[in-house]
Image (spheres, rainbow, N blue to C red):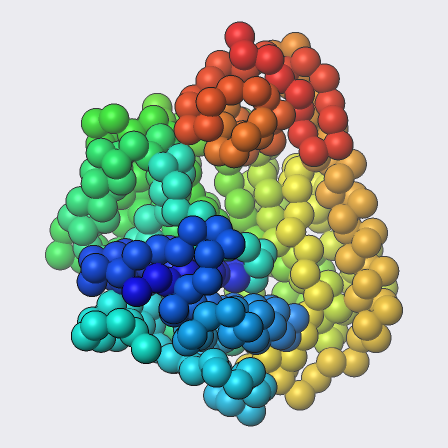
């Protein structure tokens, strides 16, 4: 049987889709090539925003035009039907964690009869999930409802997977999870900082990156582990969500802008800082948004992933959406404009210098601090690159 796997959303969704793919391959099925019709198409959907859910349904409907059977899995599938909306004819919904979906799909006998992209399971960068779920209740977030409370893998299971991925040829490993800083292996008495040191010591690993870390988990111990682990990348993605204290309190975020700025103080000199920011939260007015712009600039952030608020079922703000769509659109555009200016300012400081770039697609790759480079070099290679000039998409570089 030929199958395809597609994912939408975050890096955790990417890992979940890979788990489903691996289970299907292990069961003896064959992955469809690009453009080839599949007997089974799996769409691992996202539900972080209303738009993400709509895109998940559309992806499943599109797959149903050519595949014999389509299964919608992931966070979008775990929403109740009234919140998810109807799926297209020929699409079945399989809720629950990826491990159960993988076992169900991969274990059937015989033929099985948020970012949108076809899943790329290549040999360049490996995403290793160390933690899943969240035990905190941000007022806008549906993830605890669809993924459950925080839980961690054992450190040994993580290390075994990292060793396996390195042996498969992956140059870079990204530790990922819903709330990465909540990782705990209580039996081994290891937290995230200790895990970074352990993973960083795996022979053959050339680069280690964290997918995202909440500001309350940016601790001295974690920073020391990153600084003292030679393969640890100099990049931190630290969600902000809002730069206004009133909005943060309404969101239930458990920190203030002063805390955010204090914990990141001075780090922009050694780490590339990126972030997530929501626009149009119910209590956000123009003054609050202006404070967010200032906080982003003051924190030394260079790139912002901007997304509009949308009410999510079962959350504290499910019934509230007073900010007009046009206001959300305009605020999003202004924040993206600031993000582009801050990012370009950082790129300019790198001209004339060199970086070690992991080429992850033809003509493109990322430096140690996740700066994008345009460089002609073999895909999958770590290449010493000299930064020559700026382009719209990144820094044009030449192999040194």
Q: Nearer the viewer, residue 229 or 10?
A: 10
User: Would residue 171 be visible to someone looking at this image?
Assistant: yes
Q: Nearer the viewer, residue 219 or 329?
A: 329
Horizontal side, residue 368 vs residue 17: left or right: right
Determine the residue positioned at 74% across, 26% down: 391
Determine the residue positioned at 47% across, 81% down: 91
Quarter of the image where one finds residue 393: top right
Residue 144's spot in the image, x, y percent?
43, 74
Horizontal side, residue 121 vs residue 272: left or right: left
Horizontal side, residue 329 vs residue 270: left or right: right
Quarter of the image where one finds residue 206: top left
Residue 189's spot in the image, x, y percent?
17, 51
Residue 293's spot in the image, x, y percent?
77, 50
Give the answer, above or below, for where 169 lies relative to 254: above
Give the answer, above or below, for where 237 lies relative to 47: above
Q: Quadrant of the N terminus?
A: bottom left
């Amino acid at each position: 049987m030929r199958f395809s796997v597609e994912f939408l959303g975050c890096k955790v969704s990417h890992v979940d889709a890979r788990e489903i793919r691996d289970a299907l391959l292990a069961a003896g099925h064959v992955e469809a090539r690009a453009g080839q019709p599949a007997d089974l198409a799996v769409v691992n959907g996202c539900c972080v925003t209303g738009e993400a859910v709509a895109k998940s349904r559309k992806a499943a409907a599109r797959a149903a035009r050519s595949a014999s059977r389509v299964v919608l899995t992931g966070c979008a599938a775990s929403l109740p039907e009234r919140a998810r909306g109807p799926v297209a004819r020929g699409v079945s919904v399989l809720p629950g964690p990826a491990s159960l979906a993988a076992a169900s799909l991969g274990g059937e006998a015989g033929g099985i009869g948020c970012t949108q992209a076809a899943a790329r399971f290549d040999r360049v960068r490996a995403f290793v999930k160390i933690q899943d779920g969240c035990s905190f209740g941000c007022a806008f977030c549906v993830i605890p409802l669809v993924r459950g409370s925080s839980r961690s893998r054992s450190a040994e299971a993580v290390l075994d997977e990292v060793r396996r991925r390195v042996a498969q040829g992956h140059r870079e490993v990204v530790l990922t999870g819903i709330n990465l800083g909540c990782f705990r292996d209580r039996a081994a008495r290891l937290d995230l900082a200790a895990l970074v040191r352990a993973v960083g010591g795996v022979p053959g690993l050339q680069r280690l990156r964290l997918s995202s870390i909440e500001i309350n988990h940016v601790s001295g111990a974690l920073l020391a582990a990153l600084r003292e682990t030679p393969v640890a990348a100099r990049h931190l993605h630290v969600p902000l969500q809002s730069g206004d204290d009133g909005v943060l309190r309404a969101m239930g975020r458990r920190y203030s802008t002063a805390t955010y700025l204090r914990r990141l103080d001075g780090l922009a000199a050694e780490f590339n800082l990126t972030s997530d920011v929501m626009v149009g939260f119910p209590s956000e007015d123009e003054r609050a948004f202006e404070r967010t712009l200032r906080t982003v600039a003051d924190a030394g952030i260079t790139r912002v992933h901007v997304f509009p608020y949308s009410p999510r079922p079962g959350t504290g703000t499910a019934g509230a959406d007073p900010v007009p769509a046009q206001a959300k659109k305009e605020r999003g555009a202004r924040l993206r404009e600031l993000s582009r200016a801050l990012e370009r300012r950082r790129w300019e400081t790198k001209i004339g210098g060199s970086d070690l770039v992991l080429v992850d697609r033809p003509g493109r790759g990322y430096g140690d601090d996740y700066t994008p480079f345009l460089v002609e070099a073999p895909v999958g290679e770590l290449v010493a690159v000299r930064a020559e000039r700026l382009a719209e998409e990144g820094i044009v570089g030449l192999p040194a």
